[in-house]
Image (cartoon, rainbow, N blue to C red):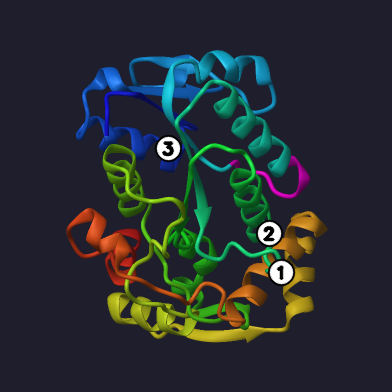
Amino acid sequence: MNNDLIIVTGATGQLGRQIVERLLARVPAGRVGVSVRDPQKAAFPNARRGDFTDPATLKEAFEGAGQVLIVSTNTAGEAALAQHRTAIDAARDAGAGRILYTSHQGAAANSRFEPMPDHAATEAYLAASGTPWTALRNGFYVSTIAHLLGRAVETGELVAPADGPVSWTAHADLAEAAAVILADGGFDGPTPPLTAPDAVDLEGVAAIVGDLTGRTVRRVVADDQEWVAGLVSHGVPQAQATMLLGMFEASRRGEFAPTGPLLEQLIGRPATPVRAYLETLLR
């Protein structure tokens, strides 16, 4: 790759921050810039103000960029698509030679989990942008397990709707892979799945937790609608509870089960397994 400026958005978030850290270990600092809503919160040099809801800021944030990595927003639905399209348009208009986007291994228009059609639609918009592009098909964040566990260690029951195997993947591994691709290139369009090598369902998670803690943790399958009603009764908005149910519906359809060797090939070491994540979580 040449010495073009690389701009990474969302550099104060968990994934974006780690991507920048690992990128700075691979390329000169002068080649790396970050685009964030509040530059004062960015712990990196060359921080520029860039807000996906304010196109004027993105014009300045992306100026001079050879590559722009768009870290997907935390919103969903039309709001997410509008923000992604705005960022893509700004990167294209700034003359970026390549636009990269943090997508998901489960990106599909027909997925039951709302963020997945958003990723698929964003990829389609990228493909029509006229600019070379790469979609990083990241595995499902392993940190999600912490939320799914809840109080399972204390109660001895991991209660959730029926699920399926998921190739849980660590932020740190995905960040390093993104840094390698930004520094070295090599991918047009969607990458193969960037995942850990094994897919584990919640019954498997419960077994690992039990082994690590020495306590029996039983996997209890909850009725879909009763589970949603329980979330709503604890203050979760209905729409959000329904979206979360979609994650389980998608996983039991096998949408997050595919694995591949590319992540480990890129980072040059074994990917972080679920057990290692849980060992750290349960300390």
Tell me which amino acid carries mark 1. Asn
The residue sitting at 47% across, 61% down in the picture is: 146
- Which residue is more in the foreground, 178 or 4? 4
Give the x, y percent position of residue 27: 22, 29
Above or below 72: residue 58: above
- Are the residues at dot 3 and dot 1 in contact (C-beta closer than 8 Å)? no
Amino acid type, label 2: Pro
Q: Nearer the viewer, residue 204 or 181?
A: 181
Q: Nearer the viewer, mark 2 or mark 3?
A: 2
Looking at the image, the residue that sits furthest to the front is 130
Q: Which residue is mark 2?
A: 117
Judge from the rendering whether residue 261 lies leftward or rightward of residue 127; answer left or right: left
Quarter of the figure that contains the C terminus: bottom left
**Looking at the rendered structure, which numbered label has been put on residue 126?**
none
Magenta-drawn stretch, dominant element (helix, strand or loop)? loop
Q: Is residue 103 left or right of residue 18?
A: right
Whether label 2 touches label 1, CB < 8 Å: yes
Which range of residues does the magenta coloring cover?
73-79
Locate the N terminus and report the quarter of the image it occupies: top left
Q: Amino acid at mark 3?
A: Gly
Number of the front mark, 3 or 1 = 1
Label 2 secondary element: helix
Q: Residue at the location (55% across, 27% down)?
A: 91
Q: What percent of the width, then of the height, locates residue 238?
A: 81, 59
For label 3, the residue is 16
Dividing the picture into quarters, in which one does residue 23 lie?
Answer: top left
Residue visible at 64% across and 44% down? 128
